[in-house]
Image (cartoon, rainbow, N blue to C red):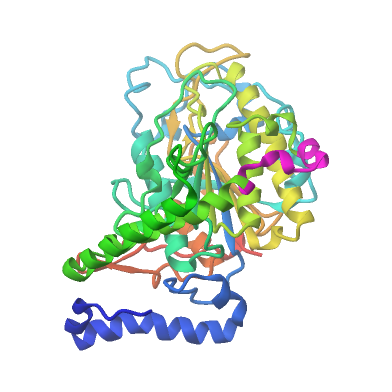
Amino acid sequence: MNILHEWDLYQTRRQLFSRGKNVLGGAALASLLGESFASASSGGAMGPHFAPKAKRVIYLHMVGGPAQMDLFDYKPEMQKWYDKDLPPSIRNGQRLTTMTSGQARFPIAPSKFNFAQRGQCGMWMNSDLLPHLAKNADDICWMRSLHTEAINHEPAICAMQTGNQITGRPCLGSWASYGLGSMNANLPTFVVLIATPTNREQEQAISSRLWSSGYLPGEHAGVSFRSKGDPILFINNPAGVPSSVRKRTIEGLNALNEINFKEVGDPETHTRIQQYEMAFRMQASVPELTDINSEPEHIFKLYGDEARKPGTFANSVLMARRLAERGVRFTQIYLNNWDHHSNVGGRMPSQCKDIDQPCHALIEDLKQRGMFDDTLIIWGGEFGRTIYSQGGLTKENYGRDHHPRCFTMWMAGGGAKGGAIYGETDDFSYNIVKDPLHISDFHATVLNLLGYNADRFTYKFQGLDQKLIGINPAKPVKALMA
């Protein structure tokens, strides 16, 4: 039953057409794209500007900032520079964090790990620690020239997730939910998983504001799934309360909320109604989803034995695949402990062991299910690390400080160009010398793969047409797209 609310009667003609343009445009686009999108998306979704290459996203965020020169940005020349000072001409007065700005020296720390070229694309990568991922070199779009303005974790991770260093904006997952809508009414559109690293030496805080919907309606916020106990807090009925009673209770609450909505007109009241209804539907869908033991043995062999352990990265990635195949639009996984201020030699092996086989398995698993071409996988952190050592330096161990001037990320599937190697840095992996890629251009590229023009993908808030890319002059990078 459609209800015409009182506040709808007082719209100006401009407001009516402003709201109506998305409805009419979405209807026209649905007719052009066929009924598949129209039937898959929720009624409130605005729909894409053009046919998307990716229907869903699995974003693997490495919290802390992986050291690019120890993983994907091969710098053999640095072996000759061991323990020599970083030349002032390379630093060029760029600011440092307070953790190393007071150092008397900035001694060069070459990577202790071996590198080799992999795939037809010839991508140089860490051959000691990433043997499984190396098999997918030609499936992956390698981006070695990311850069950002933020030099500390909180503003940097906020900028990477929301396009702005200041909190309170919607994250990429919320924008995807707002634009594309749901493909499964019984599951959230946007799900968040927090994996536990094997080594927990230096973890960063991960707060729920990173998956906030910001000024978008609350229904587009990420829903955090837990690895222990109930997957979602309070989703199960209290002891002695049958589903029939729970259903009547929710219907009663929603009736009261509808009365409140008619009186006040607060859209968040409708969000509350939808959350109650979604929670009730998830009581049936979530147990089947989280029953990972139903996976066949060959899948656990593909992902590794760690996939059987709740909360591990391998388990989280396998869960992300299960979410994706059941219609979840956007799954965000956070893996901590990449903040390698010290003990790179001791910590990098365990970090890479956590991610190597599961990332390879995810690509292969999506391929065998026919989902790789329309599922975009993103891997990366919030910034990179310095070529000079923080603290003590030996040939076997060293630390690295934050470095926003250049870092490496990768994408696979979902329209990303497999085997592409984009961007170059100098011999010190300190400055970009070819094809710089600002995080706003990266965001514009991801939105393009989802079917959106980043400049026209907006939400009216405080009198402005708000965008993920903000006021930055960002463009999608064609070289990154198949």
Give x and y (percent) for residue 282: 52, 52
Question: Residue 165, can we see it?
Answer: yes
State the image coordinates of residue 71 (x, y, percent, origin top left).
Answer: 63, 33
Which image quadrant: the C terminus?
Answer: bottom right
469 over 50 or under it: above or below? above
59 or 390, which lies in front?
Answer: 59
Q: Position of residue 216 (x, y in %)?
A: 33, 60
Instruction: Please state if 322 lies on the left or on the right of 197 as rendered.
Output: right
Decide whether residue 33 is among the magenta residues: no
Give x and y (percent) for residue 81.
Answer: 58, 22
Q: Residue at x 35, y 69 (%)?
A: 458
User: What segment is highlighted magenta in the picture?
Assistant: 288-302
Residue situated furthest right in the rendering: 298
Instruction: Give the dominant element type of the magenta stretch: helix, strand or loop.
Output: helix
Q: Residue at x 49, y 34 (%)?
A: 65
Give the camera-side residue of 265 and 386: 265
Q: Quadrant of the N terminus?
A: bottom left
Between 416 and 202, which is closer to the camera in this rendering? 202
Q: Quadrant of residue 373?
A: bottom right
